Image (tube, grey):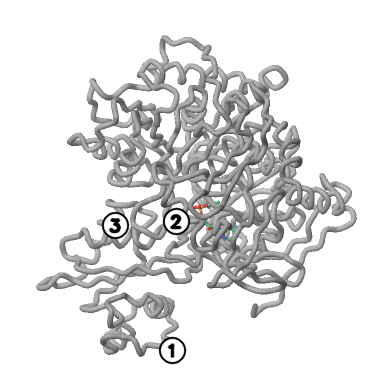
Amino acid sequence: MSQPTHIHKVSNEAKQQARLSEEQYQRMYAESVNDPDSFWREQGQRIDWFTPYNRVKNTSFAPGKVDIKWFEDGTLNACYNCVDRHLAERGDKTAIIWEGDSPEVQDEISYRTLHKEVSRFANGLKKLGVAKGDRVAIYMPMVPQAAYAMLACARIGAVHSVIFAGFSPKAIADRINDCEAKLIITADEGRRGGKTFGLKDNVDEALADNRCPTITHSVVCQVTDGEVNWQPERDVWWHELVADVSHECQPEVMNAEDPLFILYTSGSTGKPKGVLHTTGGYLVYASMTHEYVFDYREDDIYWCAADVGWITGHSYIVYGPLANGATTLMFEGVPTYPGIGRIGEVVDKHQVNILYTAPTAIRALMSKGDAAAKTSSRDSLRVLGSVGEPINPEAWEWYYEKIGNSRCPIMDTWWQTETGGIMITPLPNVNDLKAGSATRPFFGVEPGLVDNDGKSLTGATEGNLVIKQSWPGQARTLWGDHERFEQTYFSTYKNQYFTGDGARRDDDGDYWITGRVDDVLNVSGHRLGTAEIESVLVAHKAISEAAVVGFPHDVKGQGIYVYVAPMTGVTADEALTAEVREWVRNELSPIATPDFIHWSEGLPKTRSGKIMRRILRKIAANEHDNLGDTSTLADPSVVDSLIKHRLNK
Ligand code: PRX
């Protein structure tokens, strides 16, 4: 590393406040990896089971035989654990604080109200014929009904598949069709940053011309009262659906290994992967990580500023905190609206103790100097969290000083959609912190570094990050494609889970995540496959070939640099460039909007016809002085022309 490590040691005073002493932590970690069966047998008790489990861990990472089961003979219900079991002692406690896009609008939902709303909606779903095992798509803005919808599905044993509200009609249709969802839950419109955006319109387009034949109904929540088109035989208003249903709905008895949800994420091919999480292990892991990583305490106000459309929202807005009976804050808006100080203002207003957000948000605030910290005191904060991408030391220090007033430890949490919960992280006041390092594995997690040949590396070194043994929150398969699951995660390095990330381990054994080593981009914490964007590009009539690479971006972490070859006879002018940019936004998502669109008659290829992305990456990053070996190129002159016309200067 070019810069010295910024270390923040846990003070003796802070150690007194820690949930665990260093020795307890070491002992617990050792037990968790040496005797996972007994460790998780005990930890599994943190949630309520209808039928207790006898068998704890039954997992195999063996080639061709990947099979992951936890607590397999236990039965439970995730919604019961997140709602019903708190009623006796926490019925009046606020389960969800909802902070609207406008600072004038907010709501507080008690556990009792949550129980009523979720039960009613669950009965509504049943009325529409949704039954245990059916898949239900959810395409919602950040309103409490998004959480109600997820929990209602869990209550009746339906498998939810939340689709991020920024996705296009085509992306919605692809996801619905892959899991053959029966129903979609959406809203008229969403609100963000003082503007509204259509949701039902996108759903209408996704469902048009019988494009999604498995969908019988779309349930529409009235959020903005905006105008919508209506198909009476298919569309149902949420409020009308629940107008005359009972407030009581028995939670379905689910096996620990019954599916809880599918969440699509990007991989290195064009087709998104339907990551499947099951019920028991996921909930135990989400609940335990939420409690330990944030040192969550009963009266805390906890805020994870993610979107429910991503795994962070699933595990740390909904399932983890609610399983722990916490008060979880759900924020409809953006960190910069109506002003740059919004995050701190929300913290002060609700007296937030724990704040969990993403480096891209931190960098966006940091780019405006200290302004984000001027309108609030943030004295209530105790613990900070970061997630989604590597946090650069400058952003870490800024977050620590300006948002946390130099007194709140930052948990840099590394994990993935596939891991279900946090995997590598410090624990508050237990581990020393290093700006930019996710530090230590969580209980039960045994990371390793391997070289490209799969050789295990020891000591301080850098390599590909693998996880050596199963943990309860792990994804069980990809929906309908177990072979791809094995192929993607268990075939590169035998008997280990391959994360797709690279990492460095320092002399103290702390991990530093360096980023993806595959063709996956991380743009503002959003995961995007380069192949996914390329397949949208080549579907445009003016484009014959496309290659997409990432480049370092000050705020977004990575930006998107697109190389496109026009069809014969096409003139690539500004209007066409703008059209292609719009095309990607509309066909995939605004989060995939290219930063640069570079037209070129040819792309650098090997003699066997393979595009040399390594070279394209260097040119996009403006590092073309050091292109490495170009001797296998079919036509080296293409490279000179690309360098000459490079856009990221
Ligand atoms: O590259 C890693 C990065 O985000 C990827 C996972 O993306 P996703 O499945 O969308 O889940 C994001 C939220 C858990 C990882 O493969 N990543 C996530 N957290 C960190 C990170 N990279 C560095 N440091 C982190 N704390």
- Coordinates of residue 481 in the picture (x, y in percent): 40, 46
In the picture, measured across the screen, residue 331 lies left or right of residue 241, that is right
Q: What element carries label 3?
A: helix
Q: From what the image shows, is residue 551 above or below residue 138? A: below
Q: Mark 2 points at which residue?
A: 487
Return the residue nearer the eye: 233 or 106: 233
Return the residue nearer the eye: 21 or 223: 21
Spatial separation of the CA atoms under disc 1 and disc 2: 36 Å
Q: From what the image shows, is residue 563 above or below residue 90? A: below
- Coordinates of residue 405 in the picture (x, y in percent): 73, 55
Q: Which amino acid does label 2 sit on?
A: Gln
Q: What element carries label 1?
A: loop
Q: Which of the two discs, 1 and 2, sits closer to the camera?
A: 2
User: Does residue 373 appear in the picture of this structure?
Assistant: no
- Coordinates of residue 569 in the picture (x, y in percent): 9, 73
Q: Which circle marks residue 584 in the picture? A: 3
Query: Ligand 1 shows up in which quadrant of the image?
Result: bottom right
| Quarter the N terminus occupies | bottom right
Q: Mark 2 or 3 closer to N-term?
A: 2
Spatial separation of the CA atoms under disc 3 and disc 1: 31 Å
Residue at 50% x, 36% y is 100
Residue at 27% x, 37% y is 201
- In the picture as drawn, the residue positioned furthest to the left comes out as 569
